[in-house]
Image (tube, grey):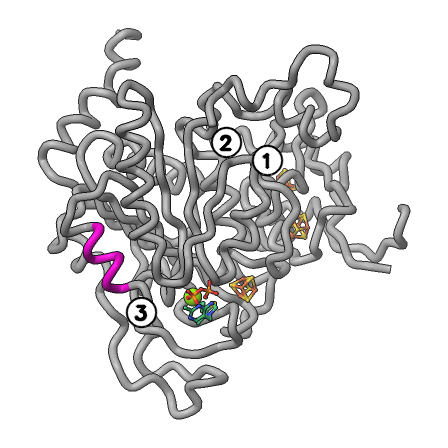
Amino acid sequence: MYYVADVKEADCAKYNCKQCVLFCPEPNTLMYHDSKHVAWVNYSRCKGCAICVYVCSDLLKRNCIEMVMVTAGD
Amino acid sequence: MGLEYVRISPGFERYMPKDYVDLVQYGQFGKQIDVQMLGQFKELVEEHPMCAGCFMAYFIRVFYAALPNPEDTIVIGTAGCARLALSQAAVPFIYGNYGDTNAVASGLKRALSIRFPDKIKDVVVIAGDGGLIDIGFGMTMHSWFRREKFTTIMVDNEVYGNTGGQESGMSPKGVQLKMAPKGKQFDKINAVELAKVAGCVYVAKLAPTNPKRIAKTIRRAILAARHFGPTFIHAYTSCNIEYSIPTEKVLEDARKREKQDFGFYEWMTDEVKEFFEEIENKPQEVKA
Ligand SMILES: Cc1ncc(C[n+]2csc(CCOP(=O)(O)OP(=O)(O)O)c2C)c(N)n1
Ligand code: SF4
Ligand code: SF4
Ligand code: SF4
Ligand SMILES: [Mg+2]
């Protein structure tokens, strides 16, 4: 089990935003879908720092991304 | 080095690792990427072992996206945390002995100018506060006195992070660290003023709170070094481990430090200013 960020796609889709993607410290991890206009997480690369949650919840008050526990292979 | 080296020979695509194929197909070789496109292209830097939430790692991520000519760039690093990521990127990386980065870069840049007089070859040093302003101080200064045409970026986490928390000349006065239990006795060194006095033609200081501005600063530092002389960026890149910053508060900390003592600062010679006025206003003139 490890801790990763997970985007609530339906909520994120309302904003056409991308801010969290621009602040993730890890490369090729918090991605942005070109046509759906939502952020998504490559779980196997996420280190669980929750900087993206700070951006979405604390700075933007949008609450579209949360930390979850996953099991390897999820 | 050069575009012809990164392209995959026809017929070999299916034998190459997927990450490499993605890099060539969806990466930034041969293009100038807008940093706002992060998350929508394959980045030059790969998975690396820097700590979760490390803002030095974040700065390095933006650094690679900002490179004006990644296929014609050599990055020089040394002992310290940054090399853990710098060594995992699809840009040639040289590990200078600790303290020697700016001497290695001086020789390399001169050699490249002789070998490829008509081509763009950018050299960038990225090293820590310890590597550049303590142990490498002499080499750093002399590369500036001698007007060597490359960029030096100090990723300042205000500590020797990689060796477990010794104070550096860049640690703020009074700060208590694992191996500075009485608190640091001296002031933080004013690296920006030293760089100006020593002969840098472009000097900037920033906290990583605004990716667009980081990218613009890096591009400017590299382009100014290409044409005019040494350039220097002093970047605050916190160490959440040694300064016990909860990872989710790392950006908040950077924003706080920006307000306190890392407000964006940029200085350049008149010659460099004129150069940017000319090249950066060009597209707008075309549109008008
Ligand atoms: C010549 C030499 N002296 C000392 C060391 C040990 N050493 C490795 S990393 C480091 C300090 C790193 O501090 P800094 O340059 O600020 O980089 P950071 O890890 O904080 O990013 C030291 C002293 C070394 N590798 N080589
Ligand atoms: S910050 Fe929030 S709303 Fe914006 S892209 Fe990220 S998850 Fe979506
Ligand atoms: S938790 Fe950290 S590493 Fe994971 S997606 Fe968010 S910002 Fe990136
Ligand atoms: S020790 Fe500090 S500077 Fe080094 S990778 Fe970890 S958080 Fe970053
Ligand atoms: Mg350091």
Amino acid identity at mark 1: Lys
Q: Name the mark on residue A18.
A: 1
Q: Distance between the residues labelled 2 and 1?
A: 9 Å
Q: Quadrant of residue B274?
A: top left
Which dot, 3 or 2, sits closer to the camera?
3
Disc 1 C-beta below 8 A from ligand 2: yes
Of pointers 3 and 2, the one earlier in the residue sequence? 2
Q: Name the mark on residue B134.
A: 3
Residue B214 in the image, given as x and y percentages of width and height: 39, 42
Which dot, 1 or 3, sits closer to the camera?
3
Q: What element carries label 2?
A: helix
Q: Mark 3 lies on which chain?
A: B
Q: Dot 3 surroundings within 10 Å: few (below 14), some, or many (20 or more)?
A: some
Q: What element carries label 1?
A: loop
Q: Dot 2 surroundings within 10 Å: few (below 14), some, or many (20 or more)?
A: some
Q: In which quarter of the image is residue B215?
A: top left
Q: In this view, does B122 lie above or below B256?
A: above
Residue at image location 54% in from the left, 40% down from the top: A22
Q: Is mark 3 on a helix, strand or loop?
A: helix
Q: In this view, does B286 lie above or below A18?
A: above
What span is in magenta? B137-143
Q: Distance between the residues labelled 3 and 2?
A: 35 Å
Q: Is residue A30 above or below residue A33?
A: below
Which dot, 2 or 1, sits closer to the camera?
2
Disc 3 C-beta below 8 A from ligand 1: yes
Q: Mark 1 lies on which chain?
A: A
Amino acid identity at mark 2: Gln
Co-location on one chain, circles 3 and 2: yes
Q: What residue is shown with label 2?
A: B36
Residue B195 in the image, given as x and y percentages of width and height: 19, 54
Q: Do the residues labelled 2 and 1 touch (CB within 8 Å)?
A: yes
